[in-house]
Image (cartoon, coloured by chain):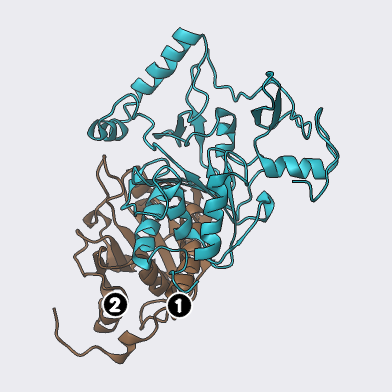
């Protein structure tokens, strides 16, 4: 413990990140440049989220880390351990017990409260980047609210596929001003972006921080005749039977066998503990791995 | 730069445990900025008079050598200058170059003198920390990001702050401080004069 400053980063770095977070909250959806640091993990492993978490964590916070909804994948486990060791904070897998939740590519099923903070790991913060590779140009497009290109992209989806095929990182318009990339969450999660908790987005490699204050107006881009649809696999969870949660498809053998399970492991566990059983589920046992 | 001996008050009144205290103070400041009108209490700094405790805490949390700071009116005194220099190392600047400005509302005027950012970089704007005689959740009605329905706060000059908000996404952001209490008003908040 003594080898590190609280939450790993030095105070000067945290101040710089904190100032960027305040600007992000003041201009929702705008990507604030920040001097991203080298972290003891590779870019692409959540260094942006880790730096934002380090800047907002308090010693008495309880932290939760999820990767695609799961608490027990490599990325989630290693980031959780990182903050256990460098900040000395308690960690949890229960969404409702957490003060700060760092997430990669999912919003928890359970509605978040006002006193919670959701920190997203963001790979490419610029929603226009795959349409216009030059930063000088995309910056100008944001300044001029020139978002026609994004609608052309969604239109081409419809022209080719008959529907908007974008399934994740689905662009949103924040407070009628900035078009924002909600990070690669499934579009199923987009309606949840209007929530009671503070949402902070950190992109380490791309050196950007942006934010959504609570109850911020967030609209998924669409067309009058092709309205936005929050889609999921048309199935129920095979473990807990939930018909409304976002599902992962898991291949279970070499013969094409598969099952659908909740992507949010804590949510699924909670339902099974409450006695819900899916088609392939077994009664819940506390110690079952 | 004046070469006077630093007053003894300049050396005391900082955080005793900077990493932990600034983390808690930042949480309060962030909550305030994310929820305009919300009044938060902070602790840990004892700045020299006439600077309030809350303004002192914000100075310790936000200022360093990279943030030019402007002191206005009564706050522009040797005691406060020395205290900020010793604890944060922030350089002093005129209002047109500052990242943060501290002072009473009338002393900070005119708002037109501060940086409001550019169309491509709206974050390159100043944040004003306004010392207030009182902070109460009454007065001007606030709506917008961070506010569920509406909030209320005793703003010093709602009409002028509404004009600042009309420049969104450019504009100034504000913290209001009184004693150990603080509230915030980002440029995104829509203000109805009650």
Q: Is residue B45 above or below residue A235?
A: below
Return the chain for callout 2. B
Badge 1 is on which residue?
B17
Residue A196, horizontal then vertical, whole percent: 59, 47
Q: CA distance from mark 2 to mark 1?
A: 29 Å
Residues at marks 2 and 1 on the same chain: yes
User: Which chain: brown?
Assistant: B
Residue A170, horizontal then vertical, whole percent: 48, 28
User: Which circle's residue, 2 or 1, is located before the other in the chain?
Assistant: 1
Task: Work out whether residue A52 or residue A229 is closer to the camera in this orientation and state it.
Answer: A52
Q: Dot 2: what SS?
A: helix
Colour in which the image shows chain A: cyan
- Horizontal side of A249 relative to A142 (left or right) equals right
Task: Work out whether residue B75 or residue B68 is closer to the camera in this orientation and state it.
Answer: B68
Residue B12, quarter of picture: bottom left
Label ID, residue B74: 2
Residue at figure coordinates x 71%, y 42% from the top left: A267
Query: Which residue appears farthest toward the front when viewing the image?
Result: A254
Residue B7, horizontal then vertical, whole percent: 27, 90
């Amino acid at each position: 413990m003594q080898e590190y400053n609280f939450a790993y980063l030095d105070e000067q770095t945290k101040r710089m990140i904190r100032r960027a977070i305040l600007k992000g909250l003041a201009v929702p959806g705008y990507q604030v440049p920040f001097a991203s640091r080298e972290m003891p993990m590779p870019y692409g492993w959540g260094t942006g989220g880790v730096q934002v978490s380090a800047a907002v964590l308090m010693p008495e916070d309880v932290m939760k880390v999820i990767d695609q909804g799961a608490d027990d994948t490599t990325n989630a486990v290693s980031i959780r351990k990182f903050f256990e060791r460098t900040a000395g904070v308690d960690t949890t897998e229960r969404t409702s017990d957490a003060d700060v939740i760092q997430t990669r590519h999912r919003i928890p099923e359970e509605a978040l409260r006002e006193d919670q903070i959701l920190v997203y790991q963001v790979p490419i913060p610029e929603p226009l980047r795959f349409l216009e590779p030059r930063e000088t140009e995309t910056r100008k497009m944001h300044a001029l609210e020139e978002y026609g290109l994004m609608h052309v992209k969604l239109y081409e989806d419809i022209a080719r596929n008959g529907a908007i095929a974008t399934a994740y990182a689905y662009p949103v318009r924040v407070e009628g001003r900035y078009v924002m990339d909600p990070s690669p969450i499934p579009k199923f999660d987009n309606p949840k972006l209007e929530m009671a908790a503070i949402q902070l987005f950190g992109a380490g490699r791309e050196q950007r921080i942006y934010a959504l204050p609570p109850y911020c107006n967030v609209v998924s881009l669409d067309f009058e005749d092709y309205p936005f649809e929050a889609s999921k696999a048309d199935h129920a969870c095979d473990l807990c039977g939930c018909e409304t949660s976002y599902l992962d498809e898991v291949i279970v053998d070499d013969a094409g066998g598969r099952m659908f399970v909740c992507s949010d492991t804590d949510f699924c566990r909670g339902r099974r503990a409450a006695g819900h059983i899916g088609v392939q589920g077994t009664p819940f046992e506390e110690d079952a791995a | 730069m004046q070469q006077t001996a630093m007053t003894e008050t300049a050396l005391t009144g900082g955080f005793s445990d900077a990493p932990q205290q600034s983390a808690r103070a930042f949480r309060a400041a962030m909550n305030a900025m994310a929820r305009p009108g919300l009044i938060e209490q902070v602790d840990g700094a004892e700045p020299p008079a006439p600077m309030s405790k809350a303004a002192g805490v914000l100075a310790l949390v936000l200022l360093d050598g990279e943030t030019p700071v402007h002191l206005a009116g009564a706050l522009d005194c040797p005691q406060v200058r020395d205290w900020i220099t010793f604890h944060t190392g922030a350089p002093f600047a005129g209002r047109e170059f500052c990242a943060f400005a501290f002072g009473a509302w009338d002393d900070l005027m005119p708002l037109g003198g501060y940086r409001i950012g550019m169309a491509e970089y709206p974050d390159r704007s100043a944040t004003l920390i306004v010392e207030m005689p009182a902070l109460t959740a009454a007065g001007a009605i606030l709506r917008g990001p961070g506010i569920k329905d509406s909030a209320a706060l005793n703003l010093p000059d709602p009409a002028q702050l509404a004009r600042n908000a009309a420049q969104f996404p450019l504009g100034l952001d504000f913290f209001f401080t009184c004693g150990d209490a603080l509230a915030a008003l980002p440029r995104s908040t829509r203000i109805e004069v009650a």
